[in-house]
Image (cartoon, rainbow, N blue to C red):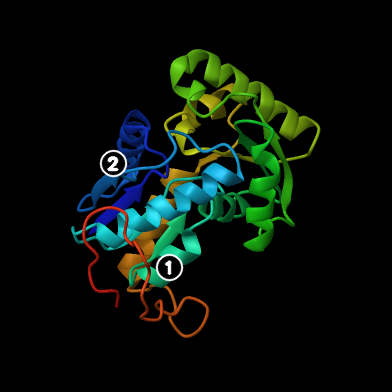
């Protein structure tokens, strides 16, 4: 099977890191195709950039002409997943929901360690909408911007671990979710520093859930909420390339 992993920002180096992790956890016979939008913000740190990114992601999907069996959206809590579910006839996985779902299989409560504090309300809203907030012990920001995660990986791990300890000791979390696609590949180091506490990487979780859904022949219901978009004129759309037929 082929899984498309879509980084919602335009930073190619982050896409490469996400691709490396996805390939590392993928089963034999699974091919990972990773990309990013052709335009949009270099990182996503707020609602304005999030909605711009959602449009850019949907634009990329509308014009993407390679076959794939499932989509993994590698932004933690950004909008746009529902639009992708309408647009595509393959399973669509969001790393925030995938991480939380997997974490709830491993402990009574989970916590999320993310980037800037301003991202906390956005993530909580996403978990609430998904029906996953009730078992979330807490969401805490590290104070690191998305692009800072790549600048000094040693410092990034130290700050993530310190923040995770707060989520465990003060909020009561039993499992930690890494709350940004830019944290891909750090799970084992963070878990070891926390004495073996389960740490879930959303990219890895989403890839494994995608494999399971494709293997079971399951995909998004088109009966109601995620029915295909109704045919109509969308002025100036898409911004990039050609517009294939929407089915």
Upstream in sequence: badge 2 or badge 1: 2
158 vs 138, left or right, is: left
Label 2: how many Cα within 10 Å (few below 14, some 14–19, many 20+) = some
- Residue 64 on image: x %, y %: 24, 57
Q: Nearer the viewer, mark 2 or mark 1?
A: 1
Is residue 47 visible in this depiction of the protein?
yes
Is 11 or 106 nearer to us in this picture? 11
Of the 4 image quadrants, the one containing the C terminus is bottom left
Q: Which residue is mark 2?
A: 23
Q: Which mark is residue 190?
A: none
55 vs 191, left or right, is: left
- Residue 113 on image: x %, y %: 63, 35
- Residue 221 on image: x %, y %: 44, 78
Name the quadrant containing residue 171. Answer: top right
Is residue 174 visible in this depiction of the protein?
no
- The residue at the far front in this view is 235
- Residue 66 on image: x %, y %: 18, 58
**Residue visible at 47% across and 14% down in the picture:** 152
Q: Which residue is mark 1?
A: 85
| 219 in relation to 176, above or below | below
**Inter-mark Cα distance, 2 to 1:** 23 Å
**Residue visible at 41% across and 42% down in the picture:** 40
Label 1: how many Cα within 10 Å (few below 14, some 14–19, many 20+) = many
**Residue visible at 40% across and 81% down in the picture:** 230
Of the 4 image quadrants, the one containing the N terminus is bottom left
118 vs 38, left or right, is: right
């Amino acid at each position: 099977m082929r899984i498309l992993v879509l980084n919602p920002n335009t930073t190619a180096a982050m896409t490469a890191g996400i691709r490396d992790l996805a390939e590392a956890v993928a089963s034999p016979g699974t091919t990972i195709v990773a990309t990013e939008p052709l335009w949009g913000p270099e990182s996503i740190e707020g609602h304005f950039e999030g909605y711009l990114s959602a449009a850019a992601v949907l634009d990329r999907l509308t014009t993407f002409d390679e076959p794939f069996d499932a989509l993994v959206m590698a932004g933690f809590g950004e909008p746009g997943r529902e639009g992708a579910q309408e647009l595509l006839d393959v399973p669509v996985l969001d790393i925030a929901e995938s991480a939380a779902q997997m974490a709830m299989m491993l402990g009574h409560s989970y916590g999320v360690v993310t980037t800037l504090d301003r991202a906390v309300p956005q993530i909580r809203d996403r978990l609430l909408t998904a029906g996953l907030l009730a078992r979330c012990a807490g969401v805490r920001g590290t104070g690191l911007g998305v692009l800072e995660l790549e600048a000094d990986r040693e410092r990034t791990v130290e700050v993530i671990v310190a923040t995770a300890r707060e989520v465990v000791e003060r909020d009561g979390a039993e499992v930690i979710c890494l709350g940004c696609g830019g944290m891909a590949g750090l799970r084992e180091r963070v878990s070891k520093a926390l004495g073996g506490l389960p740490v879930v990487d959303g990219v890895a979780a989403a890839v494994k859930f995608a494999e399971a859904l494709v293997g079971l022949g399951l995909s998004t219901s088109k009966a109601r909420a995620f029915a295909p978009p109704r045919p109509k004129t969308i002025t100036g759309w898409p911004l990039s390339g050609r517009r294939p037929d929407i089915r």
